């Protein structure tokens, strides 16, 4: 389950018509989201009219990112801003030009993945270090608002029964489990720095490896592997009662949800968007994804209820 996560935002409705054309041209761009298959159809629409002063909010072409973008959009509307939505744009190489050109002004991103896109050689790993490095790496006309504790990143995850049986809370605790342990994930994980090699170097944990690909969670539940490489926002963490192990030493590059905004509007919207980041938790993001994938609720419905529940409407 090693994939990239990207998103962007930028300039105002001046380029609204151009943004619609861009999205239409990019409908063939796929998504690497593990939660849902992209529809391939760009979703565009105005909220509150969409005149020249509208703030254009964008999203990637997968459900979890769109839900966060919709929360941003509704929070801004509730504060009196006019908003234009440009959702389902695609992946980073598709929407980054729209952000840099000003066609999109606000976008939910993921700190680690965005930092690696901008600086492939970064050595930052912890949430604060990654955020600080990202702020420095962003183009001059973009800025990062406050990051959330919510993440959508790789993790080592076990079943709740396995965690309870062995008293597991962090990756390092695996070193105390007797007998061979098998880590499952996509085949390329075996050679990645956060695969068995990194687990041994950073935590002293010996792990055999099995390439499980798309059946990783199913294999974990079946007991054919002991530890699974799972994204932290995967709804099956909640529905299957799984336990992502803490990573205090930074085996994985932290990738927290962060709003990226055009520098021109950042100060105006910070008081609206920063409280959203503060309220969005790791468990809360998983729950939002469950509502979409399991309960089949729309992003708009989910966002409205979440804002009301958190007193942000």
Image: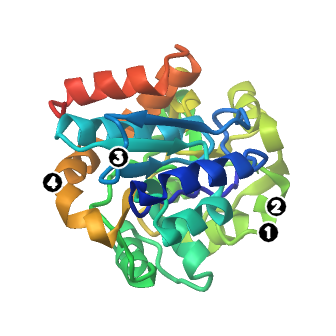
User: What residue did someone put label 3 on?
Assistant: 51
Contact flag, marks 2 and 4 (Cβ < 8 Å): no
Indicate which disc residue 191 carries: 1
Q: CA distance from mark 2 to mark 1?
A: 6 Å
Q: CA distance from mark 1 to mark 4?
A: 43 Å
Q: CA distance from mark 3 to mark 2?
A: 47 Å
Q: Is residue 127 visible?
A: yes
Quarter location, residue 107: bottom left
User: What residue did someone put label 2 on?
Assistant: 188
Above-or-below relation of 36 to 107: above
Contact flag, marks 1 and 4 (Cβ < 8 Å): no
Q: Residue at x 22, y 55 (%)?
A: 269
Residue 254, horizontal then vertical, whole percent: 47, 63
Indicate which disc residue 271 carries: 4
* Label 2 CA crowd tier, 10 Å (few <14, some 14–19, many 20+): few
Q: CA distance from mark 2 to mark 4?
A: 42 Å
Q: Residue at x 52, y 56 (%)?
A: 171
Camera-side residue: 37 or 212?
37
């Amino acid at each position: 389950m090693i994939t990239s996560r990207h998103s962007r935002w930028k300039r105002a409705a001046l380029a609204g018509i151009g943004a619609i054309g861009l999205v239409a041209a990019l409908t063939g761009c796929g998504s690497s989201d593990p939660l849902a298959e992209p529809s391939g159809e760009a979703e565009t629409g105005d909220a509150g009219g969409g005149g020249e002063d509208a703030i254009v909010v964008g999203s990637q072409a997968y459900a979890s990112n769109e839900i966060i973008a919709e929360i941003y959009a509704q929070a801004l509307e509730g504060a009196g801003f006019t908003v234009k939505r440009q959702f389902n744009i695609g992946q980073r190489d598709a929407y980054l030009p729209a952000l840099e050109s000003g066609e999109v002004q606000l976008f939910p991103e993921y700190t680690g993945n965005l930092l690696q896109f901008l600086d492939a050689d970064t050595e930052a790993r912890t949430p604060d270090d990654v955020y600080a490095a990202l702020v420095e790496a962003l183009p001059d006309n973009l800025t990062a608002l406050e990051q959330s504790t919510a993440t959508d990143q790789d993790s080592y995850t076990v079943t709740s029964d396995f965690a309870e049986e062995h008293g597991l809370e962090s990756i390092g605790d695996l070193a105390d489990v007797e007998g061979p342990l098998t880590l499952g994930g996509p085949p390329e994980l075996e050679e990645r720095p956060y695969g068995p090699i990194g687990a041994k170097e950073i935590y002293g944990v010996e792990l055999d490896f099995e390439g499980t690909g798309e059946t990783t969670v199913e294999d974990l539940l079946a007991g054919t592997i002991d530890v699974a490489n799972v994204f932290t926002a995967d709804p099956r963490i909640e529905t299957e009662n799984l336990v992502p192990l803490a990573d205090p030493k930074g085996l994985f590059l932290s990738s927290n949800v962060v709003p990226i905004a055009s520098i021109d509007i950042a100060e105006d919207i910070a008081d609206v968007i920063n409280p959203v980041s503060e309220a969005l938790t790791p468990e809360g993001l998983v729950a939002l994804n469950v509502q979409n994938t399991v309960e089949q609720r729309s992003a708009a419905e989910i966002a409205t209820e979440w804002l009301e529940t958190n007193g942000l409407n």
